[in-house]
Amino acid sequence: MTIEILLPLFLFVFAATITPGPNNIMVMTSGANFGFERSLPHLLGISGGVSGIVLVMGLGLITLLDAAPFLVGLFELASVLYLLWLAYRIATAQAARNSAAGARPLSFVGAAAFQVINPKVWATGLSAITLFDPDRSTGSAMIIAAAYGVIGLLSNVIWAWAGTVLRGW
């Protein structure tokens, strides 16, 4: 990957991670309900999970998906079903109470695992690999994954902070 590609890559990753999506809404809600510090494992889990998925894509999953396009449809179907279930749960949820038994922010592992079914991660990750690593080099895949980890973490920090601001309201 050449130096000329890095700025467009970083801008792409920033646009992909700062715009509203499942992760942003979840960390904003976590910041509002539990505060910034208690939401840190959630933030770090998102960063690790997204980076891991993008790295796996860059190291060969995209080749498998090119060879077996029906798998893309299965991923899309699973993502849509999950999002519908999540929308139903949000629409019918009671207000969270920090003092309620069992109320806690999403864990590192839970947040990382969520990325497997997060359609925005798959869509933007596949786009980034396709655009910025057309030769499918290991080094470029690692750079793209690292960009998602660092820039995505910063984007999610902004959303979690916004949640803590909303907490006061």
Image (tube, rainbow, N blue to C red):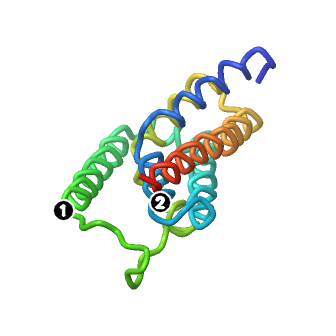
Q: Position of residue 156 (x, y in %)?
A: 57, 46
Residue at screen point 59% across, 40% down? 155
**Residue 133, relative to residue 82: is it above or below?**
above
Crowdedness near tag 1: few (<14), some (14–19) or many (≥20) residues, C-alpha within 10 Å:
few
Residue at screen point 39% across, 85% down? 101
Q: Residue furthest front?
A: 169
The three-letter code of the residue at mark 1 reads: Thr
Query: Which residue corresponds to mark 1?
Result: 92
Q: What secondary structure is found at the residue carrying circle 1? A: loop
Depth check: give the residue in front, 67 or 91: 91
Query: Which residue corresponds to mark 2?
Result: 30
Task: Give the left or right position of residue 1, taking residue 48 as reference.
Answer: right
The three-letter code of the residue at mark 2 reads: Ser
Residue at screen point 29% across, 51% down? 83
Task: Give the left or right position of residue 81, taking residue 13 as reference.
Answer: left
Q: Position of residue 91 (x, y in %)?
A: 20, 56
Crowdedness near tag 2: few (<14), some (14–19) or many (≥20) residues, C-alpha within 10 Å:
many
Q: What secondary structure is found at the residue carrying circle 2? A: helix
**How many labels, in total?**
2
Task: Give the left or right position of residue 18, taking residue 79 as reference.
Answer: right
Depth check: give the residue in front, 73 or 84: 84
